[in-house]
Image (spheres, rainbow, N blue to C red):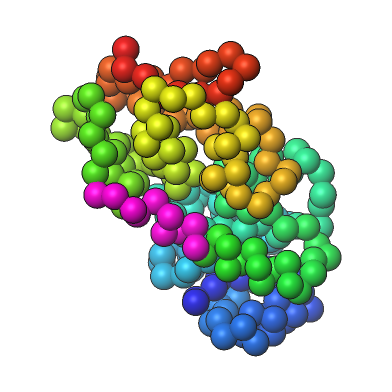
Amino acid sequence: MKILLVEDEENIAMLVENILKKEGHQVEIATNGADGLELGLMDIHDVILLDVNLPEMNGFDVLDRLRRAKIQTPIMMLTAYSQTSDKVRGLTSGADDYLTKPFDREELVARVEAISRRGGTVQVDDVFKISSIEFNPKMLTISADGEQMHLPLKEAQILELLIKKKEVPLSSDHLIERVWDYDDYVSDEVLRQHISRLRKKIKQLDSNIEIKVVRKIGYLLKTK
């Protein structure tokens, strides 16, 4: 697996590099946000490990630029901070995971391998057709009447789950467990923000489906 590590602290970069190389991975290192963004935009890595506090451009800005450029490489944020607000900001901006320094070697390896597998979890079917919408889970796109929009990985995973259980409400816990699996700090608010953005995209396509809230139960996909 080819991993991009964007980290300006030399001792941490060397430690992470040694750990991952012992697991058989290739590691490319950028020591500032600008270089990390340039390498990330090449879209040749299986996973990106992205520090938050970086010179030239902080990790949140790098993350935002990568996602705006439609780069879907799984990204794990690294930070010395443990505040919930920082975790929420990273996850709602398109990060796949968040690891606080100092971290355990086994945890780092397990999380890297876990998010690398997520990059391919939305490729099980060809195209879903539901009313006026077509959803391609492999290409991460939704389309209607010739107009097409690209979805971030998390939104695509949520939509796939809702489509497969059409007209059946799915709880917040179920969606969080299936999309984020082991991340116990992912809150209902993070899920709500992802669903809100997904709703806006569906509405932009002027489709006749919508994501409804079933009070005290969860969410379901429904034809208007």
Residue at position x 23%, y 24% in the image? 131
- Report whether residue 34 is seen: no
Q: Nearer the viewer, residue 107 or 145?
A: 107
The answer to which image quadrant residue 141 occupies is top left
Q: Is residue 190 above or below residue 68?
A: above
Residue at position x 64%, y 46% in the image? 90
Range shown magenta: 117-126
The answer to which image quadrant residue 59 occupies is bottom right
Q: Is residue 208 above or below residue 54?
A: above
- Report whether residue 186 is seen: yes
Q: Position of residue 201 (x, y in %)?
A: 38, 28
Residue at position x 79%, y 78% in the image? 11
The answer to which image quadrant residue 204 occupies is top left
Q: Is residue 90 above or below residue 168?
A: below
Dominant secondary structure of the residues highlighted in magenta in the image:
loop
Q: Position of residue 208 (x, y in %)?
A: 28, 17
Q: Nearer the viewer, residue 144 or 111?
A: 111
**Given the current orientation, which residue lies at the most extreme left position?**
146
Residue at position x 45%, y 43% in the image? 157
